[in-house]
Image (cartoon, rainbow, N blue to C red):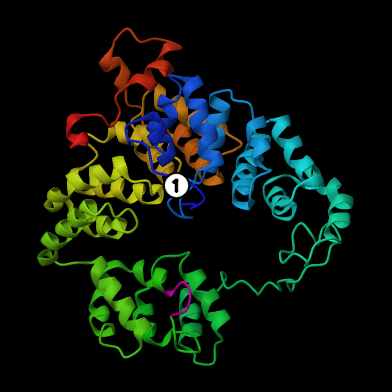
Amino acid sequence: MNDEYEMSYALPDSVEGLLQRGRGLGAVRALQDQRESAAFVYDGIRRDWLWDQSDERSVYLARLVCDLDLSPMPVVNMLAGEEEACLRACGVLELLALAGSVEAKDGLRAYVHTGEHWVRVLERMSAGWPPEWWEDLGDVARARMSAEAELPWRSEPWTRLGIAVQSRPLVPRPSLNGLSTAELLRLLADSHTGDHTKIDALRALNARKPAEELIPLVPWLGMSNGLRPLPLLGRAVRRLGTLAVPAAHGWVQAERPWLALLGTEILADHPGPEALPGLVNELAEQWAAQDWCGPYPTARRLARFGPDAAGAVPYLRRFWLHTPHSYERTAYLQALAAISGDDGLEHIYTESLWDCQETTRLLGITSAPTNPETLDRLAVLRDDPMETTEVRAAAGTKLAAPDGRTVLTLFERASPTIQGASRFRALAHFPWSTHAEWRA
C-alpha cells in the first residue's frame, strides 16, 4: 500500500470498506447509492488500496465506472499525478477505452503528447490496445524520446515505432513441447544440459501430467551456481502432491539450503494428523495479529484435512470478510469449501462473480448456483471487453453447458414478488455475507 497518505481501511461491512478491499459485495451494494459510491470509486483509483502488488483492481474499478455510469474525466485528470497514481489511472482508462469510452481513449492519447510519465503510459497502451489506436503517435514519441535521459528498455512499442532501446532483442529458443516426457527427463538428468534448456524442459513438463520420475532428479536441479533451484522446479514438485513427500524427508537434511527449504515446504504442504491443532492455532494467531499477508498457506494446508479442520472455519470466514489482501481471498474460499462443503457458500460464490481478483471470479464461475442473477452476470463476464481472456472463456463455457437444474434464486426465496428489472436492484440489497455466523 502506498505510504503517500496516512490511510486506514474503512469498516469491512461498509460500502467504502468493501470497495477498498475489492469485494464483490461492494460492487453490488454500490448500485444502491450511486451518488455516494461514486466518491469511493474515484478514491479507489486516486489512492493505492492494494495490500501488495499481487492484488488486482483495474478491471474491478473500470467495471464500476461503467456500471455506475460515471464520467471518466476525473480519472483522466488523475494522469497528472505522481507516477504510481498516473499508472493506476492509466490501467482503468485503458480498459474503459476497450469498452467504448472515447473520453478515456482520447485522454490517454493526449497524455502521450504532454504527460510526464508518457513512456510507461504508451507502453501500457501498446500492450492492451490494438496497434491502430496508438501507432500514429510515432512522430510524437520520436520527438519526445530525444529529450529523455535514457532510452527505454522494453522492445515494444519502441521497435515498432523505429526507436532504439537498451535491451537486446530476445532470440526465441526452440520449443521443447514436441518432446516426450521421457526425453524431457533425459535433458534434466544430463549434466551437460544448460540452465536455460532445463528451465524450458520444466516448463514443458508443467504443461502435462505430473511425472513421478522427476523426483530422483530434484537434488541435481539447482542453478549452475548452486545457490537456488531452477525456476519452475518448485511448481513441478508441488504438482506431484503426496508422491514427493517420502523424498522430501531426505531433502530437509540436505546441505544445500535451497533443497532443504524445498523439502521443508513440501512437508509443510502435506501435514500429518498431528499437525492439525497447531495449524488451527497458527491461523487463530494470525487473525489475532491481523496478519493479512501470509495466512493463505495455512488455509491451504488446513484444507487438506477436510471436515476434521472444522475448528478453522470461523477464522477462515473472518479472513474472507476482513482481509484487505484480496489475492488471498481465493484460498480462504477454497479452504472453506474443502472443510465444510459447498453448502452454505452459495451466496459467497455468487458474490465472487463481482470480485476484484481474477482467480476468485473464476472460482465463482465454476461454483455459483445456477439462477437468473448468476446467469445474467455470467453473460456480462463473457461479453465484457475489459475482462481477462480466462474469465471470458470460463463464463462462456459455463453458459454453453448449463447443468439444467431449476434453482430458486436467493431473491425469490427472500421475496417471491421480486420480478423483472427489479431483480438486480434487489441483488444490491440481499444480505450476502451478513449472516450471524459470518459476522462471528
**Residue under the image location 43 percent in, 43 percent down:** 362
Residue 223 image position (x, y, % from top left): 48, 85
Tell me, yes or no, whether the highlighted magenta stretch contains residue 383. Answer: no
Residue 141 appears left or right of 37:
right
Place residue 388 in its image quadrant.
Answer: top right
Overall secondary structure of the magenta section: loop
- Whether residue 98 is visible: no
Element assignment for label 1: loop
Extreme residue in the front direction: 6
Residue shown at the point (47%, 23%) measured from the top left:
36
At horizontal 21% and vertical 35% (from top left) the residue drawn is 438
The answer to whether any part of residue 204 appears in the image is yes
Q: Which span of residues is magenta-colored?
A: 229-233
Vertical comparison of 107 with 159: above or below: above
Q: Nearer the viewer, residue 48 or 30?
A: 48
Location of mark 1 (residue): 6
Amino acid type indicated by mark 1: Glu
